[in-house]
Amino acid sequence: MAGSTPPSDVPPQSPPPGGAGSGSGGQKKSDRELIEGALRAAQPRTRAPHHEDLLPPADSFPGYEIIREIHRGGQGIVYQAIQKTTKRKVAVKVLHMGPFAGSRGRARFDREVAILAQLEHPNIVSVLDSGLTSEAAGNQCFYVMDYVSGQTLDVYLTSSATKPIQEILGLFLKICDAVNAAHLKGITHRDLKPSNIRIDHSGEPHVLDFGLAKIVTGEVTESVEHPEMMSMTGQFIGSLPWASPEQAEGAPSKIDIRSDVYSLGVILYQLLTGGKFPYQVIGNMRDVMDNILRAEPARPSTVRKQINDEVETIVLKTLQKERDRRYQSAGELAKDIKRYLTGQPIEAMRDSGWYMIRKTVRRHKIAFIVAASMLAVVVGVSTYAYLSGVQMKQLAENKEAAVKERDLAVDARIKAEEAKDAFCRMYDARTKQGRAIARASLNDFYVRIKDLIGVTPERAALLDAARTYMVAIKDELKEDPDALIDLAMAHEFIGELLAGLHVPRLDRENASAEGLASYDEACRIREQLLSRDPGDFKARTATATAYRGRALAKQSRNDFDGAFGDSKAAMTHIEAALKQPGQAPASDLLAGQAVLASLVLQLGDIRFAKAANLAGSDSSATEVASLMREGERYYKDASEHAQKRVAANPDDFAAARSVWVCLDKTARAKIEFAERLIAEGQKRVAAGDKPGGIAFLDKAVVALAAVELRGSIERSLQEFDRLRARWPQQHRVLRDIAIARHNMGRVLMDEADAIAQIMKADPSREMMGQNVSSLYQEAQTWFEQALATARELRSTDIKDLGAKRDVALMLNKVGNCQRELGKLVEAQKTCEESLSLRDEVLASDATLQHRRDRGLALQKLGRVKMLRATQTSGIERERAAALAREAIELLNRSLSDYQMLVTEGAMKGDAEDIAEPTRYRTLCEEFLNK
């Protein structure tokens, strides 16, 4: 690792004798040991201090004073030194007697010096001098290069999954530019991996170690490769996880700059996913080689959902097995990343769906014959990766696709259960290594299943595994900080699952209470760890994260004051961390600023949620108004945070979006407040308190008719359209547009509903109803626009369950307006489409939330058929009776879904959701009994 220093002041540890591929006592190591050794060799090493006695004699390197050893590898040793004439810090690499001793080792060493001398790039370490050590030091070859402080990319990978994708791509772009500088000189690196890339304290990357480089042009030439360099033992093993298929095949003539592109692809995959590989690289040697040669990489979006189609396309193009299908140089790769970062269309085109199908069919011929299907089931649990968007849309819109989707959900459950079993077998929490394995297994398993359809039971199984892990490590804690961190992590893990913050709730009445208790313990442990070193940036931010999670758990239980207090505590910790800029790299400080902004937004959420919760009570109007103003102020503050980030970096999409998300959230909060007023008004009217109920309904009409509310929705919609035009690849904006249009429809429909309820309760106010029909008509137009946008978003990722649910929601709203306008035939068709989607979603992932959605869709369709049967003039009696019977069947199914929710403790037995279909069913029965 030329020119590098360890991430701390602890000198690095020498590897065990023999390196990868050798065993102790002459015993041959297993394939798994070799590969694991290679992965360890690629990680930053540490060793015990006080090894000054191992330093070479003074004056071994003429003109340089050796300070300490910073790296020891199979070919040589790297020392930190001072150039005596300039007092400049440098790194000195010396060839030692090891695996590369002899003429070949010397040739490789000389080649590296010659290559580095040709390269002049700010992100490639520079050679300053070379020569031979003194006779006392053995006349060994050495060269001097720039000293690069900071950390290796390995260390960066440990937290890269939480870093903004734009930041990761910006860093990777510089790495590509450096590698491309070598490519332009006819140099293929052939050993690109995270440990050969170093990030200095300013965040700049530096590509190191050209010892395995191949030169095809220039003054320095190279003969055909030495066969042993392409073997699967010795030095090459260290790079196997990042090797290209042609390297793994052992075909020297096929290795060129496109091989580097493949290795860059593996690195980019790791950067985006927090260090994960695109396929399995641990196990039997033959299996690992087969994975490199033939296994299709798992889509990175299955690991990190925020990765969009464009970024995934770039990654997968770099990882094509066939060289001609990759980017043809690091420069081409860099250009496409630049296009993406500047909002331009990328050049990479997704592979033809049929091309990928043909490859998959050849590998799984029997399975495809049995299934008689053209859907490719990818290794792991990623699905639908190989079909084009058009083909997927056509398939998903018929019943056959629904069946296939259910089959894939079953496959996901099987894979998840296998992962859990493997985890339970492999960990031993009594050792630090065992805890590390268990922690990695839990995290990996969670990431893989948290966004999958159809795996709610597996989330429960994962929860059991986490509990088992926590119990196992609890007795081993004592005063071990690492063990305490593991315990806090396990409590946070359980709290998140049970509180349902990022995954569907586990649908048990006591789940959120148990989740809150887990967060309580996590906060206690984090505070205990922080008290040992209040200046520890990571400990401080980890404590803030625990409080933030507990705040969300409390908010879900309507403990708004507790949630507000915890959010404030989290802000205090983040602010304290940000006041210690020297304790963290710039990227972590930027991430901390983003977290701080999100906490401000969270405070606004809590204030508006409390106001809405009080809206239906007899609480002081002054208190409610104060909460609303406070929530709006927090949203404004969050928007100003985002505006500052945009001012600092106009290309920051996330910040630009956040500015207008804050405005959109303000509008949504006011709409939800008005809807609470309407619900309370209806409840009081039904209970006989007409004056009190009408008072609430009047308040809702005033709130919904406010020009300011509609103006804020229109403004946010305009800005989202502008963002969409600038960043067309960012599909998140499509959902923002759909929601903004949906919000405008809600305002109009809610106002119409409130007026209709007032007229029903007090016929003397019938003059209010003159505009009701026009309000419903205008609302329908907005909902139809929202529906069109939701359909467009769904077409970008047909497997996105949330997008399918959004389409069903918009259909419900369109159907509501059609029903109120008396367009009952149209409303029936709309509700039937919505119910079909709800059925598919529930079949894919049988959570209670999805069952509730399906129950509501059944209720809405039943209501429309009831109205057609009982209120349509000129309809034949026999046809009307048939519609009434169909309505009863639908309403019974709706009540069956609701009853299951009651049984599971997710709905009260006297809920209005149950009373409404019961009332419609009674009307149908009375009609049939006439």
Image (cartoon, rainbow, N blue to C red):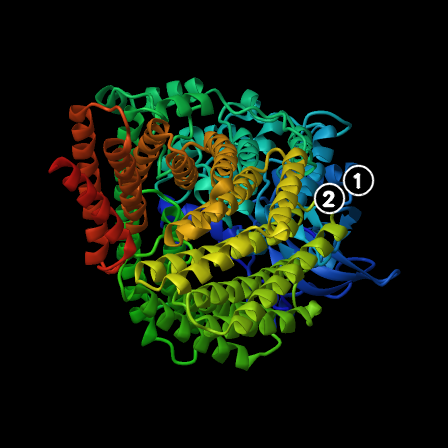
Q: Which of the 4 quarters of the picture holds residue 714?
A: top right
Helix, strand or loop at label 2? It is loop
Q: Name the residue nearer the viewer: 29 or 415.
A: 415
Report x, y in % for residue 589: 66, 62
In this rendering, the count of numbered labels is 2
Marks 2 and 1 sit apart, C-alpha to C-alpha, by 7 Å
Residue to which mark 1 is pinned? 120
Report x, y in % for residue 753: 43, 47
| Amino acid at circle 2 | Ile
Residue to which mark 2 is pinned? 124
Helix, strand or loop at label 1? It is loop
Name the side, left or right, on which 624 lies relative to 460: right
Q: Name the residue nearer the viewer: 321 or 655.
A: 655
Report x, y in % for residue 80: 71, 61
Q: Name the residue nearer the viewer: 438 or 91.
A: 438
Q: Residue 477, relative to residue 828: is it above or below?
A: below
Name the side, left or right, on which 812 lies relative to 752: left
